[in-house]
Amino acid sequence: MGLILALACTAEPTPDSTPDSPVDSPVDTGELPGRALYYAECLGCHGTQGNGSDQAPAVHEALAGWTDEQLVDVMVDGQGDMEPRAVSRDDGQHIVDWMRATF
Ligand code: HEC
């Protein structure tokens, strides 16, 4: 009994006092993370304002009428002439948040 207690006691004090917080992203000035993703994955076809190009239609109608989930579906699964993009659903949600806040 005493031994178990002693072991329990010695095992207990493991102070996690070194938070070792990795990158606090000091570069991020409050921009939504979706911006960088959009610029990398969507901008080339849909443009800086989502107005589209000769490669793709504008996204405004879709933003106005579709749910977040439907928008993420298009990115992850593709639609018609748009190939699926290499983004996770989480990334897709970031992109949706950024587009809704920006366009
Ligand atoms: C290589 C060019 C290309 C890229 C890159 C691209 N798209 Fe598209 N996108 C298209 C084309 C083409 C369509 C039209 C698809 C169809 O319905 O035939 C489209 C359609 C869409 C639509 C639906 C518009 C509508 O009203 O039907 C949305 C929303 C959309 N894209 C969002 C995105 C987002 C967000 C990204 C980045 C993750 C992205 N696209 C990347 C070419 C692209």
Image (cartoon, rainbow, N blue to C red):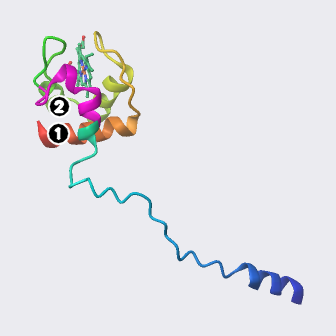
Question: Which quadrant: the N terminus?
Answer: bottom right
Q: Is residue 55 magenta?
A: no
Q: Quadrant of residue 50?
A: top left
Q: Is mark 2 within 8 Å of ligand 1?
A: yes
Nearest the viewer among 69 and 15 is 15
Q: Is residue 38 magenta?
A: yes
Nearest the viewer among 21 and 67 is 21
Badge 2 element = helix
Give x and y (percent) for residue 8. Answer: 77, 81
Circles 2 and 1: CB atoms closer than 8 Å: yes
Whether 24 is drawn above or below 36: the answer is below
Give x and y (percent) for residue 91. Answer: 35, 38
Q: What is the magenta segment's predominant secondary structure? A: helix
Badge 1 element = helix
Whether 53 is drawn above or below 18: the answer is above
Q: Quadrant of residue 62?
A: top left
The residue indicated by pointer 1 is: 100
Range shown magenta = 37-50
Amino acid type of the residue tagged 2 in the rendering: Leu
The residue indicated by pointer 2 is: 63
